[in-house]
């Protein structure tokens, strides 16, 4: 499962880099933070 989590992070980073609007960038940043914080918990549950 660990390969999956790094995959998700890379995809989120790509989306962040490609996003130009500051407002949407802030939202993406929040989402990425949530994903990075929650993924280990998610993996523990599974």
Image (cartoon, grey):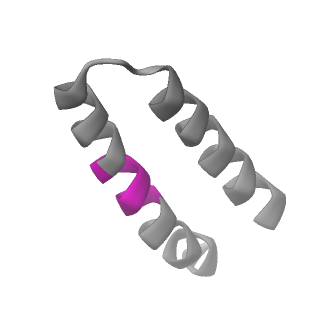
Task: Answer yes or no: is residue 2 visible.
Answer: yes
Image-quadrant location for residue 46: bottom right
Image height check: is 38 above or below 10? below
Residue at 34% from the left image edge and 38% from the top image edge: 28
Find out whether residue 44 is within the magenta segment: no
- Identify the main secondary structure in magenta: helix
Is 17 displayed left or right of 25 in the figure?
A: right
Residue at 54% from the left image edge and 66% from the top image edge: 39
Is 24 displayed left or right of 32 in the figure?
A: left
Q: Quadrant of the N terminus?
A: bottom right
Residue at 68% from the left image edge and 58% from the top image edge: 5
Task: Answer yes or no: is residue 1 visible.
Answer: no
Residue at 26% from the left image edge and 19% from the top image edge: 21
Image height check: is 18 above or below 7? above
Image height check: is 38 above or below 19? below
Question: For this rendering, which residue is in front, 29 or 7?
Answer: 29
Percent across and percent down for residue 8 are: 63, 46
Percent across and percent down for residue 31 are: 34, 48
Is 3 displayed left or right of 23 in the figure?
A: right
Percent across and percent down for residue 24 are: 24, 27
Tell how many labels: 0
> Which residue ends up furthest to the left in the rendered image?
23
Question: For this rendering, which residue is in front, 37 or 41?
Answer: 37
Question: For this rendering, which residue is in front, 22 or 36?
Answer: 22
In this picture, which residue range is highlighted in magenta? 30-35
Image height check: is 23 above or below 4? above
């Amino acid at each position: 499962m660990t390969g999956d989590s790094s995959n998700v992070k890379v995809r989120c980073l790509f989306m962040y880099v490609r996003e130009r609007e500051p407002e949407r960038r802030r939202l993406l940043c929040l989402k990425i933070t949530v994903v990075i914080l929650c993924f280990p918990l998610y993996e523990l549950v599974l």
